[in-house]
Image (cartoon, rainbow, N blue to C red):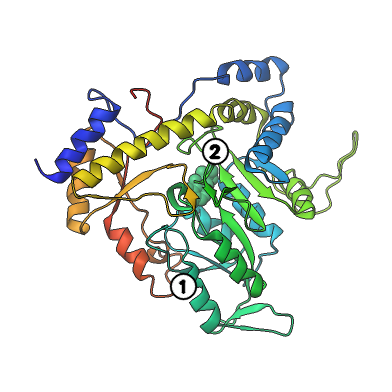
Amino acid sequence: MSKIEKLTEFVKSIYGNDRFIPLHEPYFNGNEKKYLNECIDSTYVSSVGKFVDDFEESIAKYANAKYAIATMNGTAALHTALMLAGVGNDDEVITQSVSFIATCNAIKYCNAEPVFIDIDKKTLGLSASALIDFLENGIYQDLNGFSYNLITKKRIKACVPMHTFGHPCEIDKIVDICKKYKILVIEDAAEALGSFYKNQHCGTFGDIGVLSFNGNKTLTAGGGGIILTDNKEFAQLAKHLTTTAKVPHKWDFNHDMIGYNYRMPNINAALACAQLEQIDFVLKSKRETAIKYKKFCKENDLFFVDEPSNAKSNFWLNAIVLKNKVEREEYLKLTNSNNVMTRPLWDLMSNLKMFENCYKDDLSNSIWVRERIVNIPSSVNLNS
Ligand SMILES: *Cc1c(COP(=O)(O)O)cnc(C)c1O
């Protein structure tokens, strides 16, 4: 048997031989049905209700953030975060080319352009050294200290690093550099619920952080997002913007700006509250699976993407690095025709036609990992 055949058999031996093994399926084993029933019985299934407040409070406490604002999905949370940072027409936002499309879409919703800086091979997140290189050589600052791209002359308002697959990037360094250049940091921590860098939860290092509770994430609300911040003004504006910018009044309608209907429905929050109660078990199970993969890979001369140093990953999606594109294709074909779901890394954002003209550095690491990485099944495992 070849290495990749052995790995396929190994995945099956972990998750069970006789069924389709998804990449990441939700795990419901707590108060989900109870809270959903309470929600329905109360008739408060929509835009108001106690579960939204409960969820915001519990997640803020878990991540140790001052404020948490719930939204209908992670993309809406990202869009709102960028608006809070004042990102608008003709601004630029530094981000990575290795990400899910939502990151760049949210930047475009603000009529701004992404600037693609390379990732670090160890963390798969934005490279602090590539960022320093760009800021030291590729920008100029005005008298206020604001930064502008030397080539495009556009103002760089924000930087959105992403914690890829739940592995924390070098977020402390990124925040330090961005401060110097008056660039706000919005962490796309959509994949990083339960991930910690130097014992601090991902999404709480930058000015604003964003989490996702989509169906394929570590925990799910059906659909949902969270905006994390310690900044009271940002928190108040986030709540206002995501709730149609309605001025509070007992009966009258008054809206003082263009707002969005981005709030999380109570029924989704009910699910989210039940899920969050189980996070310790979920993280434990996912870590155990990661350890099994790591051991197998070590014994079989395969490269497993482990958590970076100084970090505790949630191991949202486990990944292996194959020799080259040919081996990647072979493995994808073998697994997906054998009831084992695997996926390559997203195509680089800089390759998509909507973003092909955006400023980018050489992206050598991004190109390298795009050709080699494959995600393997990572759900909570009840067989172990
Ligand atoms: C999941 C995800 C999001 C947000 O996704 P939603 O499906 O809108 O909740 C944003 N960025 C990244 C990197 C993601 O993986």
Q: Secondary structure at mark 1?
A: helix
Q: Is residue 231 left or right of residue 319?
A: right
How far apart in space, not on screen, are marks 1 and 2 (Cα)? 30 Å
| Ligand 1 contact, mark 1 (Cβ < 8 Å) | no
Residue 250's x, y, as percent? 91, 34
Which x, y percent locates residue 52? 70, 32
Horizontal and vertical percent position of residue 366:
37, 64
The residue located at (45%, 32%) in the rendering is 284
What residue is pinned by disc 2? 213
Query: Who's the residue at 47% across and 42% down the image?
Result: 314
Is residue 229 in view from this perspective? Answer: yes
Q: Which quarter of the figure is the N terminus placed in?
A: top left
Q: Which SS class for mark 2? A: loop
Q: Earlier in the sequence, mark 1 or mark 2?
A: 1
Of the pair 15 and 295, the residue shown nearer to us: 295
**What amino acid type should be assigned to the residue bearing mark 1?**
Ala
Q: Closer to the camera, 351 or 342?
A: 342
Left or right of residue 323, residue 309 in this image: right
Residue found at the far left of this picture = 1
Mark 2 beta carbon near ligand 1 (under 8 Å): yes
Classify 1 as above or below 330: above
* Res. 130 mark: 1
Give residue 364's quadrant in the image: bottom left
The answer to whether residue 337 is visible is no
